[in-house]
Amino acid sequence: MATLYTQADRNIRKTWFYMTGFLVFVILIGWMASYALNDQAILWIAVIYSVVSSFIGYWYSDKIVLAMSGAKPLNHDDNPEIYRLVEHLCITAGLPIPKIYILNEMQPNAFAAGRDPNHAVIALTTGLISRLDRVELEGVIAHEMSHIGNRDALLQTAVVVLVGVISILVNFFFRISYFGGRRNDNREGGGLMIIFAVVLLILAPLVATLIKLAISRKREFLADASGALLTRYPEGLARALEKISADPNPLRVANSSTAHLYITSPFRGRQTKDWFSSLFLTHPPVEDRVRALRDLNI
């Protein structure tokens, strides 16, 4: 059974597994494209691009996500209460104090990012700070601190970069095949390889999305439980989740690449409840999370 202590090591291993799989997958795409277009330079482009982007994804994914969301640093004097909440929870959890960022958005929401607890950030929207009371806000921050503590933040932010890289690379290969390139359909089996390469290129974004969804939604349940353990008050986070999910305001800076980072889905009016569509949701249903929190005995 996964615990707060075993989950961190497990997530570090999974991060390296996903990033290695990403490298292999991109190189496979490059090899298929180079074979189909009879141009070995494409394979080298894929290898170099995947290595560089993996390096960037590991070391700079938090900065990329912050830039994509338009987050700005929150100064201590601007909101001392937020800093006190974060410091108190960090002491309780035995974690370094992360940098705190603010998103100028009306929708109450939050996310954590960073490759390890020493390089972590927490981003809160202005709507979250203004709409939630102290115990609710403490519950949300504790949830995000739990993501940092068990290394969810590393895995989640790295995937944002990797999925985007695969989409860009596939688009690049399609442009090469459309505007130029020497097709390899005269060699034995060349036509079949071209068909296979085209199918792989079409499926690549879907596979990338499945990699992102492979970051199990159970991590949200674990972070909820871990956050409730930090505050010793599950009801605070339960009430916060209900308020956040009920808010109708859109999150303008959210997109499909970063949606899984937030404490709840930032998209409003797009959730579906049929079983098939639920397989592709980035978050568990809020109702299930609230029920699980209120069933905790702490």
Image: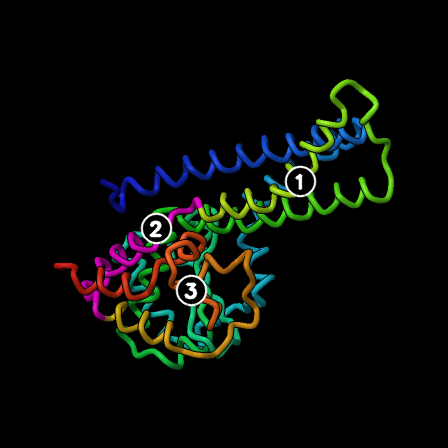
In the image, which is nearer the foreground, mark 2 or mark 1? 1
**Earlier along the polypeptide chain: callout 2 or callout 1?**
1
What range of the chain is rendered magenta? 214-235
Which residue type carries mark 1? Leu
Q: Residue at x 56, y 46 (%)?
A: 206
Q: Residue at x 46, y 57 (%)?
A: 260
Residue 219's disc number: 2
Q: Residue at x 85, y 35 (%)?
A: 181
Q: Position of residue 227 (x, y in %)?
A: 27, 59
Residue 287's disc number: none
Question: Does 39 sit left or right of 94 as displayed?
Answer: right
- Residue denoted by label 1: 201
Single out the residue that lies furthest toward the left: 297
- Residue denoted by label 3: 272
Question: Does 135 sit left or right of 210 as displayed?
Answer: left
Q: Residue at x 70, y 37 (%)?
A: 198
Which residue type carries mark 2? Arg
> Which of 50/38 is in front?
38
Q: Does 128 sit above or below residue 167?
A: below
Q: Quadrant of residue 33?
A: top right
Which residue type carries mark 3? Thr
Gap in angstroms between the C-alphas marked 3 and 1:
28 Å
- Mark 1 element type: helix
**Earlier along the polypeptide chain: callout 3 or callout 2?**
2
> Which of 281/13 is in front?
281
Q: Does 121 sit above or below residue 213?
A: below
Q: Look at the image and say whether residue 148 sits in the magenta stretch.
A: no
- Mark 2 element type: helix
Single out the residue that lies furthest toward the bottom: 130
- The quarter in which the N terminus is drawn is top left
Single out the residue that lies furthest toward the top: 188
